[in-house]
């Protein structure tokens, strides 16, 4: 039945049902009656739109089950179940579960997942059927698996747009910095994703700041995604199964950040046999063990990485003999248990830390900790649920001094979440998702201990608490054979709780706001609360099996803010709740895209445009003290942002030569009163200025070439327009110092030179294992980062001379271009699995 | 605090830097009033100059023919500054400028326009002691070395601000990273500590030069025979905010430390035209300080005591 006909029938149904069936309501209550009628009409209308109510009933049954990898029992995320007779189907969820309800009939199913052999099967659907399917790895395609394509035509057929997905297999093939496979670095090769340069933590998505990305590891938020100041990300690729980045059209089940959701799923662990894999690289060594606890019932994975620069250094020098430490590590563990056909539980944990210890009393360290517990339950073959409980913590600390005189400080954020989610596979046309999330935040914005001659003074800032709660509902609905819509709504609520509330007077924009009063609240009393409605909509109109137009709109709210006024994001940035002085951030984004697949899905093309409006963006007064500051809110400014652009993407999925080209043309600007106000000294009304991560052109190229069964070459090329920076015009001499001065108070008025870089990689498989009857597999990865040794600028800074000033002589000033990496970095890594 | 991070991180990473000379935008060429006065019995100097192109390394040139005066707003006394070849100055006879607790108004008059600024002269604590310390090799320096701390106690009552200046062997420790200021006993008002001994970073962090001026290599901050002289200058809150902002504008450690630096912006000024509708751009700062100082030489005897205490 076409969608038009169905809607027509619905309209008829509503009018008839609404007007002629007033039920038992008394006519003496016309108002109530009318309201009830309206409500009834609304409900029946909704049900009708979802296709629940049909003119004629037809006997239907549900086919459901789990899709898995036959070799290790890992759930396949996003695999397709295609009903050949109907030309439609469904896709497995993040736990590998699928469900589809069809009229009683005999069907042929095709189950597909890229890189795996198609599975064809006959199903005589005469009752509700549970069908778990294990797919086999397609041997000859081993070498040429590129971007995880999931369903082969997902690019066109899925309603989801503005997403970027990478399978771990393609991430592992890319030439990487010092040969270390890296998830965050890999997603930066996709359109719309950038970073301000080497050394900066995190990533920027469609003109959003680093703190506007929600990074989830098995659903637990990870507050700092970088090791060693952004050179590596904190996720161990050996334990990661799937990575999906939502840049727009974000479904209603996600919320809490403005720009993107990076959803990283960990492997469950092989439930068939034991696997040991690992690698020896230039910076890290890695080891992962996985295997069944009880075959096909329960499995585990434990994966660890540690840097060993310090271990090597200790062998050759005494530089670290005074108790100093320099290392980072992460440990990822997960286990799951199949209680029965309808219940499965998972527990996973992550612990990672960077340590720069200079002796027993001095140093700097930071790290994340997360723990998740999840329970998948099938209430029926149509109702899938997942209940997640998780904990996440990020902290950093810094110590300076000795036992007698010590100065230390730190900052910490902890969250406790509970998240029930339901997927209701209503019928072949509707998949309804609903659920909620409750988050308790604990902030330690700054704990500070000051010790003088053994006597301590604790000047820690007050701990803060907040609650965030949200409920959502959404539906993926097929309206006819060409039109699919995903619509949903999310209600989010935030409550800033207890402690001291500060009230400030207004002042000239850009100056510290003077304190008016302080109010003490009881621990759990509400200081400020916010309630927001976030509508979400995505539409896919498929012209043919290979062409589609997609459009989306989403509104997002963000209640916690990453406070950073540094050039790049760093581990010492702190998280701050929305308060009576700091409003939640809000963004509205629209996107429109054209998607085309060619040559039987061998080539994927897409073009997307987006426009994003951002409100209540956080900025800082000049000279703000964001470190440990009780009155931080008096120095925060609020402004608006806008980001828009065009993203082009072309990808070749198969063949000896595969890879992709992505290009983004983008603008990202902010306007904040008190910043970039030109000559308007009186009102200081801000003018639009480009943000630090405004990069006009962003070209990325990734290519893989299979020379033969054993050897694969890979390369990637990056070109980014220079990022903006603030350059002075004058120098002024005050108090004996030479100070840069910017005519007209401009912000980001210049651009540093463009960034471009070529990386090369070669993977040789089965070097030792896999030969002469030896089991397992191994590979050597040789990579060259920054192959033509370009000194890509991170920033240009202006400073007075380093030499001590001789009295009476003028000070010299100069500009310095800084490159974090100014040379070729070759690397070698050996990876094994047995 | 950030300077400490710079040291730590600078040691761990090697990056690459070279000097560039980008073409900059149009010059503001504005008037700069540099008036940091104090109550010491010595010549008080006000530099009034024009800003220069950023890469112009010459000495800034005085703006001539201005009337410069300082008015005590509490008792009405007026101090007239005379024009010298390089600057405007006031020469004391037998006592210094100003009285603690009084407010002052600086007036700079040209033929076209009058500029003013207001500051108050606040109290300052005595320096109790200067203590040298003997250190065995540690992460800052892999050899036996001497460091120093000065001890002074912030008087009770919140809101006292100070600029701490230090001289090693008579040479002013005036590098950007050595700009040392205090808000009460703490480094900033956001971390309030009142009426106590200055915190460790203030006592230690800015007066121990670990880098040799000539060789640029790590060296013992103090050796036997070296001396330290420290002065605590009281400043007002506006002066503190100015210096705090200034610190982040001039501290460009380079290398990996650049990750932690703030974007460039103009420092504040308390100099303004008496005409509220004036659009003349002006920069600089006026403040007036009460000063207490103390010095100590690291003699053999002092060094022996330090070693014994260790």
Image (cartoon, grey):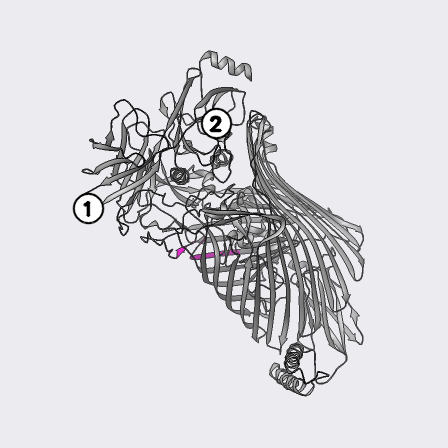
Q: Residues within 10 Å of mark 1 (few under 14, many from 20)?
A: few
Gap in angstroms between the C-alphas marked 2 and 1? 47 Å
The residue that mark 2 highlights is B153
Q: Earlier in the sequence, mark 2 or mark 1?
A: 1
Whether residue A107 is in magenta: the answer is no
The residue that mark 1 highlights is B112
- Foreground of the two, A348 or B158: B158
- Residue B186 position (above or below residue A781): above
Give the mark count.
2
| Residue A86, percent from left and from top | 68, 77
Q: Identify the chain of the residue marked 1, using the numbered disc in the image.
A: B
Q: Give the side of residue A1 with respect to residue B25, left or right.
A: right
Q: Quadrant of residue A24?
A: bottom right
Which numbered marker is on residue B164?
none
| Residue B194, percent from left and from top | 50, 33
| Residue A19, percent from left and from top | 65, 86
Q: Give the side of residue A536 with respect to residue B178, left or right.
A: right
Instruction: Specify the farthest residue to the front.
Output: B75
| Residue A20, percent from left and from top | 68, 88
Whether residue A700 is in magenta: the answer is yes
| Range drawn in magenta | A685-702
Q: Is residue B87 visible?
A: no
């Amino acid at each position: 039945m076409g969608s038009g006909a169905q809607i027509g029938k619905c309209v008829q149904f509503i009018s008839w049902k609404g007007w002629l069936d007033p039920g038992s309501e008394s006519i003496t209550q016309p108002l109530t009656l009318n309201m009830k009628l309206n409500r009834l009409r609304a409900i029946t209308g909704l049900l009708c739109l979802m296709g629940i109510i049909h003119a004629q009933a037809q006997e239907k049954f549900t086919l459901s089950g789990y899709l898995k990898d036959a070799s290790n029992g890992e759930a396949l995320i996003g695999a397709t179940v295609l009903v050949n007779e109907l030309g439609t189907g469904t896709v497995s969820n993040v736990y590998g579960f699928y469900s589809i309800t069809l009229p009683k009939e005999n069907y042929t199913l095709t189950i597909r997942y890229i890189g795996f052999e198609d599975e064809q099967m006959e199903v005589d659907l005469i009752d509700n059927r549970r069908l778990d399917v294990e797919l086999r790895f397609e041997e000859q395609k081993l070498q040429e698996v590129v971007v995880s394509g999931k369903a082969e035509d997902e690019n066109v057929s899925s309603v989801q747009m503005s997403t970027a997905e990478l399978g771990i297999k393609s991430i592992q093939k890319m030439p990487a910095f010092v040969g270390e496979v890296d998830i965050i670095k890999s997603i930066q090769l996709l359109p719309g994703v950038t970073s301000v340069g080497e050394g900066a933590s995190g990533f920027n998505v469609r003109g959003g700041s680093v703190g506007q990305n929600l990074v989830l590891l098995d659903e637990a938020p990870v507050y700092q995604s970088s090791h060693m100041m952004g050179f590596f990300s904190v996720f161990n690729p050996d334990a990661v199964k799937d990575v999906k980045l939502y840049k727009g059209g974000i479904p209603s089940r996600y919320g809490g950040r403005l720009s993107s959701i990076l959803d990283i799923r960990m492997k469950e662990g092989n439930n068939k046999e034991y696997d040991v894999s690992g690698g020896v690289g230039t910076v890290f060594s890695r080891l992962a063990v996985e295997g069944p606890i009880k075959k096909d019932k329960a499995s585990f994975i434990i994966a660890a990485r540690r840097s060993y620069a310090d271990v090597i250094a200790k062998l050759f020098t005494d530089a670290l003999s005074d108790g100093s430490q320099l290392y980072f590590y992460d440990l990822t563990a997960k286990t799951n248990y199949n209680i029965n056909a309808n219940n499965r539980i998972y527990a996973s944990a992550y612990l990672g830390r960077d340590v720069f210890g200079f002796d027993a009393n001095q140093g700097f360290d930071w790290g994340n900790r997360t723990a998740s517990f999840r329970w998948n339950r099938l209430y029926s073959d149509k109702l899938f649920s997942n209940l997640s409980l998780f904990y996440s913590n990020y902290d950093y600390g810094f110590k300076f001094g000795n036992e007698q005189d010590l100065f230390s400080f730190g900052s910490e954020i902890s969250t406790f979440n509970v998240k029930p989610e339901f997927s209701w596979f209503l019928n072949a046309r509707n998949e309804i998702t609903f659920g909620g999330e409750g988050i308790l935040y604990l902030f330690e914005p700054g704990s500070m201990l000051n010790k003088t001659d053994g006597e301590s003074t604790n000047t820690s800032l007050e701990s803060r608490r907040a609650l965030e709660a949200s409920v959502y509902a959404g539906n993926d609905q097929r309206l006819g054979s060409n039109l699919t819509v995903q619509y949903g709504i999310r209600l989010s609520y935030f409550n800033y709780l207890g402690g001291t509330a500060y009230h400030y007077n207004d002042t000239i924009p850009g100056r510290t706001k003077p304190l008016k009063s302080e109010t003490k609240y009881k621990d759990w009393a509400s200081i400020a609360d916010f309630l927001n409605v976030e509508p979400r909509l995505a539409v896919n109109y498929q012209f043919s099996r290979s062409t589609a137009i997609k459009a989306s709109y989403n509104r997002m709210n963000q209640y916690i803010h990453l406070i950073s006024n540094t050039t790049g994001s760093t581990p010492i940035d702190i998280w701050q709740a929305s308060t009576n002085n700091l409003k939640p951030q809000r963004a509205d984004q629209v996107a429109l895209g054209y998607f085309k697949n060619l040559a039987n899905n061998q080539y994927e093309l897409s073009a997307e445009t987006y426009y994003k409006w951002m409100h209540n963006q956080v900025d800082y007064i000049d000279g703000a003290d964001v470190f440990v500051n009780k009155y931080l809110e008096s120095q925060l400014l609020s402004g608006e942002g806008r980001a828009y652009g065009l993203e082009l993407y072309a990808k070749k999925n198969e063949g000896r030569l595969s890879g992709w080209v992505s290009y983004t043309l983008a603008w990202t600007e902010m306007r904040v009163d008190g910043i970039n106000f030109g000559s308007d000294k009186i009102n200081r009304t801000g003018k639009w200025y480009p943000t630090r991560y405004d990069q006009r052109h962003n070209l990325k190229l990734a290519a893989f070439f299979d020379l033969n069964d054993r050897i694969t070459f890979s390369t990637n090329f990056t070109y980014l327009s220079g990022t903006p920076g603030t350059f002075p015009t004058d120098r002024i001499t005050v108090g004996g110092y030479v100070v840069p001065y910017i005519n007209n108070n401009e912000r980001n008025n210049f651009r540093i030179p463009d960034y471009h870089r070529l990386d090369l990689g070669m993977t040789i498989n089965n070097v030792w294992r896999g030969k002469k009857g030896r089991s397992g597999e191994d590979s050597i990865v040789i990579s060259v980062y920054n192959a033509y040794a370009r000194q890509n600028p991170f920033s240009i800074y202006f400073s007075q001379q380093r030499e001590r000033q001789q009295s009476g002589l003028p000070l010299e000033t100069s500009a310095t271009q800084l490159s974090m990496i100014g040379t070729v970095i070759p690397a070698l890594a050996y990876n094994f699995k047995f | 605090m950030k300077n400490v991070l710079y040291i730590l991180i600078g040691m761990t990473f090697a990056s690459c830097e070279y000097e560039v000379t980008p073409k900059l935008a149009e010059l503001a060429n504005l008037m700069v009033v540099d008036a940091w006065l104090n109550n010491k019995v010595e010549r008080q100097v006000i530099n009034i100059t024009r800003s220069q192109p950023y890469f112009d390394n010459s000495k800034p040139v005085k703006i001539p023919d201005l009337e410069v005066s300082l008015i005590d707003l509490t008792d009405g006394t007026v101090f007239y500054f005379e024009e010298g070849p390089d600057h405007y100055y006031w020469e004391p006879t037998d006592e210094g400028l100003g009285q603690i607790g009084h407010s002052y108004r600086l007036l700079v008059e040209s033929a076209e326009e009058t500029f003013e600024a207001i500051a108050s002269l606040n109290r300052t604590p005595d320096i109790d002691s200067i203590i040298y310390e003997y250190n065995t090799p540690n992460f800052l320096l892999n050899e036996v070395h001497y460091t120093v701390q000065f001890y002074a106690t912030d008087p009770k009552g919140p809101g006292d601000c100070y600029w701490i200046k230090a001289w090693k062997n008579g040479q002013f420790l005036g590098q950007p990273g050595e700009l040392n200021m205090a808000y009460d006993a703490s480094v900033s008002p956001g971390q309030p500590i009142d009426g106590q001994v200055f915190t460790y970073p203030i006592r230690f962090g800015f007066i121990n030069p670990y880098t040799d001026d000539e060789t640029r290599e790590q060296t013992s901050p103090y050796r036997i025979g070296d001396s330290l002289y420290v002065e605590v200058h009281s400043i007002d809150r506006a002066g503190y905010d100015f210096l705090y902002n200034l610190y982040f504008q001039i501290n460009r450690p380079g290398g990996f430390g650049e990750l932690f630096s703030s974007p460039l912006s103009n420092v504040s000024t308390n100099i303004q035209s008496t005409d509220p509708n004036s659009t003349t751009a002006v920069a600089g700062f006026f403040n007036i300080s009460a000063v207490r100082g103390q010095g100590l030489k690291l003699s053999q005897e002092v060094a022996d005591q330090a070693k014994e205490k260790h």
